[in-house]
Every structure is written in C-alpha cells, then in structure tokens.
Image (tube, grey):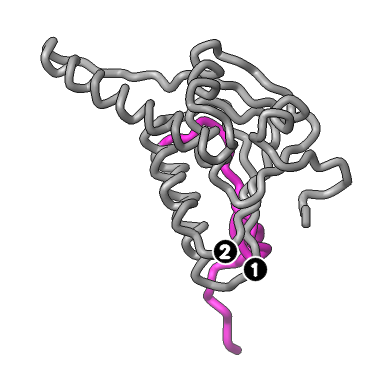
Amino acid sequence: MVYDESPPRDDLADRLLEQRIVMVSGSLDHVRANDAAARLMLLDGSGDDPIQLVVSCPDGDLVAATALADTIELLGVELRAVASGVVGGPVILPFALATRRLAQPHATFRFVEPAIDVQGRASDLAVATARHLHVLAEFHERIAAATAQSVETIADNFRQRRTMTADEATACGLIDEIIRRHGLRAV
C-alpha cells in the first residue's frame, strides 16, 4: 500500500490562494506585509487572472505598508483590493494603489498619521525624525496620486485623524465601488 505523505492542503490561506485571494488582517507589521507581498508575487507569476486582496487592518507600520505598496505597484495583473472592516493609518497606501478599490458597505477608513518610535541621542532623533517626515511626505503624495486628490487634502485628512464611511471614501476617490451584493467576488 502506498501512502501519500504530502501535507493536507486544508489550510485556509492556501485554499484562498488557489482562488487568487490574499487576506491581510490585524495590525500590518513586517511579517504580515512580507507574507502578503510574497503571496501576491506568487499569484502574479502564476497567471494573468486578477488577484483579490481583502484588507481589514486598522493600523500598521509605515515601513511595512510602504514595502507592501511597492510590491503592489510592481504587479503585472489586476489587483482588486476589498476593504472589509477598518482600514487605517499606513494601510491606506497599499489599499489605494490597487488597480480597483472596493469596499463592503460597513467598511471604515481611518486616516491616522503613522507614528514614529525612536530612541537614542538627540542627533539620532533628529535624523530619524527628518527621515520619517520625508517618508510621510512621499506617503501622502502616493495616496494623492492614486485618488486624484491634492497632497494637501490627503495630509489634512491624516492630521485631522478623519474617519470615512465607505460612501464618503467613494466620494473622495479612495474607493471605486461599494460591494452591495452577496459575496466577495466583484467584476
């Protein structure tokens, strides 16, 4: 008798991957961003069908979000991002860079300035703060370009810690469509 010793393919993430769906939830840290980027690159290299990225991340690390956004910009296939739950802080950038941006009706977008956490001598703090401000300016510029809003409007949304409903996010160009039908697949 021959036994199949390969691991069972019942892992939910693997099963979703087979459907060309990548889910990212929780605070977007480097581990989650790298995992999502790897899955997106794998799917990009394995076919021409669109990929769906389901996002429910209320906050995250600016560097991790920027790295995921860089990967999204390199994809050669259509990426449909679906906001589910809260999308906030730095996670708005990778969401905004998707080819199509969709949201479930209850989705919320929280514009919260990414925090900086540095320690050390005053000169180290000055350098880190200057670098953070530079990355933050690029962050605002990339979202503005993706949404056809001014950089000032985007920066103000973050400074004011604005929260938007799916309808408000549609009006400002952050999302293209609210999914009003049952199911996640949107054409």
Could you tell me residue 21's position as x and y percent? Answer: 64, 56
Q: Would you call the spot at circle 2 few (<14 residues within 10 Å), some (14-19), or many (20 or more)?
A: some
Do the CB atoms of the residues marked 2 and 1 lie less than 8 Å apart? yes
Q: Which quadrant does the N terminus fall into?
A: bottom right
Give the SS element for disc 2.
loop
Could you tell me residue 149's position as x and y percent? Answer: 57, 30
Name which residue type carries label 2. Answer: Val
Could you tell me residue 172's position as x and y percent? Answer: 67, 29
Queried whether the magenta region covers residue 2, the answer comes back as: yes
The magenta region covers 1-29
Please name whichever residue, 151 or 73, is drawn nearer the observer in this view of the structure: 151
Distance from disc 2 to disc 1, alpha carbons, whole Å, reads 7 Å
N-term-proximal mark, 2 vs 1: 1
Q: Is residue 165 above or below residue 78?
A: above
- Left or right of residue 146: residue 64: left
Circle 1 sits on which residue? 49
- Left or right of residue 84: residue 151: left
Q: Is residue 99 above or below residue 138?
A: below
Q: Residue at x 64, y 26 (%)?
A: 109
Give the SS element for disc 1.
loop
Q: Residue at x 51, y 41 (%)?
A: 94
Q: Residue at x 40, y 38 (%)?
A: 64
Q: Residue at x 64, y 65 (%)?
A: 18
Please name whichever residue, 155 or 107, is drawn nearer the observer in this view of the structure: 155
Q: Is residue 100 above or below residue 29?
A: below
- Left or right of residue 6: residue 109: right
Q: Using the image, tell me which numbered label, if any, was put on residue 77.
A: 2
